[in-house]
Amino acid sequence: MKSKRQYRELFENAIDLLYTHDLEGNFKAISKAVERISGVSRSEVLRMSIYDLLDQESRDRVREAVREVLGGSPRGAFEVSLVARDGVKVPLEVSCRLVFRGGRPVAVQGIARDITERKRAEALERDRNRVLEMVAGQEALETVLGQVCGLLERQMPETRYAILLAGAGGVTVGAAPRLPAAFGAAFRGPTASGEAAAWSAIVERGVAAPVDLAAEPGLAGHRALLLKAGMEGCWVIPLLSADASTVGAFLCFQRERAVSVPAPPAALEAAQRLAVVAIENRRLTERLAHQARHDTLTGLPNRRVFEERLADELENARRHSRLLAVFFIDLDRFKQINDTLGHATGDAVLRQVAERFAGTMRKGDCLARLGGDEFGLVLSGLSDTHDALRVGGKLLDSLSAPFAIGAREIFLTASIGISLYPRDGREAAALQSNADAAMYRAKSRGRGHVEFYTAGIGLAAIERMEMEAALRRALEHGELELYYQPQTDARHGLEAVEALLVWNHPRLGSIPAQQFVSVAEESGMIAPIGDWALGEACLRNAAWQRAGLPRVKVAVNVSPVQFARPDFVENVVEALSGSGLDPSLLELELTENVVMKEPDEAVRQMQRLRALGVGVALDDFGTGYSSLSYLRILPIDGLKLDRSFLKELEREPNTVPLVSAIVALAHGLGLTIVAEGVETRQQFEILRGIGCDRFQGYLLGEAAPAAAIERLLKAAGSMLR
């Protein structure tokens, strides 16, 4: 009875949404979190089905998930959109499993986590990366400021301008090219500490006025440089932001000391606006970058940084055969604080908890807030499991003193779960899942405890083993098939097709590649599957050509594991020679992370492919490294814009000039641009207007079996004749 009561309490107080529905989707039980997330009362929800709360796309996704688990196929976490009472869509990450009675499935249990903040942070991170790609770092800001100075110099040839930025990091300058190099160098690296302080003080005065450098402490050397360059007067004109704060200053150096107006007012005002925009955009970008990677409440790294650090530390642990620990920390009964004392008090407690936890960390440890009252920790450099246990004890001890919030004292405990590499998993996802499971077991044992993961091989591992075995049978029994999606030009003429792998499972039906490729890569099955797909695509296109159908390229995706094999190019040669396909009608698509992992080796591999006459394209461009400088040296023929750009074209006007710039850059390098995921007429017209070469997506044709594509090619051939 006690355990049932504890389970009920855990169910009611869970931050995540816990639910059970029957096989038709009708809710049987749901936690109170649904009221906070959806704005609909629990009593109302219990009279609804899960499909009533979701948008159309999410309904299809849930139905597919239910079909898969009923068919015995593993199903990882997936994302849906809940439509709240006010019409706002709330993104949720969902995991579900079957409930059995008498050996028969009767219901589905699920956990849904609100990932709104994570989605917002990811969007901020994408925006930050794209801006960084365009401006290429701090040097770009100096270039812009130099151009602003040049604009003013052209208005008054006898004047030399520089833009001074003085702050906590020292003094930097963006100067026009005609300003003496030695003078610019003096700003970039002041030799005396007084120089930076003196210039900072001048900027902060915020009044346009002439400055006598000889009278300023520590700036006599700068005056000597001016005299050497034939300059006499120096004016300082502050650059003010919209809130009237000083972000920098123009320095105006002139041959005449008596100057009433340092530049024509119109030109000066325009230049001031340009300079302030450049400086504030840089600062905004840096601020957004920090926000995208840190929790706004506690200042700790967020989940994204936690997962990146875990991946890095895991790679180090593998390389050096070291022990690694992953902690999941959840505050006990924290919901009661929010419910009884208010969210402002809860936020204050979270900030103090973060400070106490951080005080127990070593330099270099990654402590992050994962969301709500949940924290994560990646601990490396351990000598044995006792080190992890000692850290867990320190974290619990840090909570022992009461939290003083105003006149109130609050006592708090935490439950901590720990998983260890390599004992409890060799991949990041498994370690996180197992640490989470250990944390829930710590809660079930009375809270305020540290628990190691000890469950051994779990259900997820068994499911992956079963899928691996089924994949091996699939290749042997001919269950794999290639579908082909058309790529057309602006006139809707068919120019190429992309080969897409499909698994025709005997029980589950058609399964797209994205649901089983990761298992194939981890198990080593991707090599024979990739070889089969490459050979089949070449054979099919060669047969079309022998039948006299219009010439089209066939694009084949190449996995990272496949591309890294030393015999990959030889396998391509074998596929071409075995099919008789003209190499110019084969295009291999590589993702950015494949190419950038070992760029030198990737370039050599691509050069060998190009020497065969095979085309090479960079797939999903804009989601990975997106290093524009590397495009100059990569031996590629084209870029495929990631579909995320297309989704933003209609709702984010700023995306259009970004995509237009990428298209212009690609064309300047002689590359073809393919827009992937074109679903609406508006997207197509925008992309056609900015010069995309080929288009792929549901608007222009869905992926179809080879026979359907053959009929399409015959129809195209008839029109040409």
Image (spheres, rainbow, N blue to C red):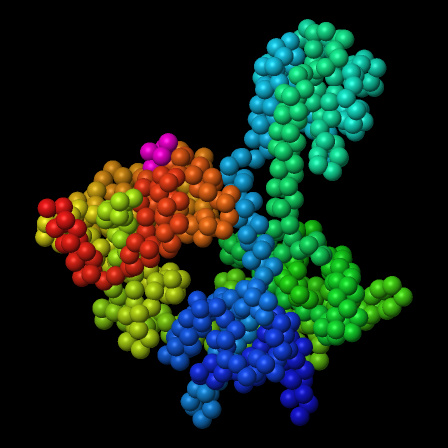
Residue 80 in picture, x, y percent from top left? 49, 67
Q: Is residue 386 above or below residue 531?
A: below
The residue at the point 28 percent across, 70 percent down is 504
Picture coordinates of residue 488 (x, y %)? 27, 48
Q: Which contiguous range is marked in magenta?
A: 667-671
- Residue drawn at the location 63% of the way across and 62% of the way down: 370
Q: For residue 294: magenta? A: no
Question: In this image, 618 relative to 170: left or right?
Answer: left
The front one of 696 and 372 is 696
Residue sitting nearer the eye, 43 or 358 = 43
Rendering coords of residue 204 (x, y %): 79, 29
Residue shown at 84% from the left, 64% from the top: 405
Above or below residue 310? Residue 445 is: below
Q: Main secondary structure of the magenta part?
A: loop
Residue nearest the viewer, comparing 358 with 651:
651
Q: Is residue 64 left or right of residue 31?
A: left
User: Does the segment drawn in magenta span residue 668?
Assistant: yes
